[in-house]
Amino acid sequence: DVKVTQSSRYLVKRTGEKVFLECVQDMDHENMFWYRQDPGLGLRLIYFSYDVKMKEKGDIPEGYSVSREKKERFSLILESASTNQTSMYLCASSFDTYEQYFGPGTRLTVT
Amino acid sequence: AQSVTQPDIHITVSEGASLELRCNYSYGATPYLFWYVQSPGQGLQLLLKYFSGDTLVQGIKGFEAEFKRSQSSFNLRKPSVHWSDAAEYFCAVGRSSGGYQKVTFGTGTKLQVIP
């Protein structure tokens, strides 16, 4: 079974803090994705990566950056957390881009 | 622009009753279509997918979906709902954008199952 793990299930941070969300997949997938999920808005793509050290902006990249130093690990970085970044963050990976496997999510609260 | 519409935000059905969740998409080319399920506190799990061929596709947990090009729809069905089906369901379409392949998700339909 494909396994995508995320470093934290719940996280509480203060405004202005730098936040790292980690995602690891164990299936040697080329492609990895970060989404945020908000009620009534579904999933929105923040960033994605098709290869090590490669990244592309998604639909809502503002306020976020990413890092992919190793194939299995894709990190989402909030340089200076703000309250409007309180959300559920979901990581996904895929071999075939269209079929994605998701982690359990990290619920981030910024106070 | 490509989009996915799930017109029902919330649906309640009785256990044992049939279920149909609606999904309409807007996409110029032949779409790649998906249904995912998200149980409370969990990530998304793929239920089924349509790429081509037979327009009625079978998925896991007894779900099926039918692709209707003329109606731009990909509705999810189950003949008899179980209490464990209570979850949020997302329809999604694969799209090509900027030379990359991405997935656009609908806003979700939350299913409540009553005894």
Image: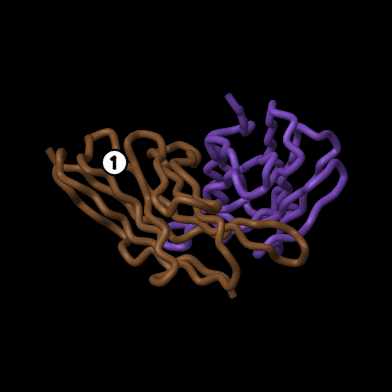
Report which quarter residue A9 is drawn in: top right
Report which quarter residue A32 is drawn in: top right
**Looking at the image, can residue A83 be seen?**
no
Toward the front, the furthest residue is B53
- Crowd around label 1: few <14 · some 14–19 · many ≥20 (10 Å): many
Q: Position of residue A96 (x, y in %)?
A: 67, 43
* Residue placed most toward the observer, B21 or A105: B21
Chain in purple on the image: A
Which residue is painted at 60% across and 43% down in the image? A100
Q: Position of residue B91 (x, y in %)?
A: 45, 55
Q: Position of residue B12 (x, y in %)?
A: 20, 51
Instruction: Chain B: give its colour.
Output: brown
Instruction: Say what secondary structure mark 1 lies in.
Output: loop
Which residue is painted at 61% across and 27% down in the image? A3
* Residue placed most toward the observer, A7 or A111: A7
**Looking at the image, can residue B25 be seen?**
yes
Which residue is painted at 53% across and 35% down in the image? A104
Q: Which residue is mark 1?
A: B86
User: What amino acid type is highlighted by mark number 1?
Assistant: Ala
Q: Position of residue A90 (x, y in %)?
A: 58, 44
Which residue is painted at 15% across and 39% down in the image? B16
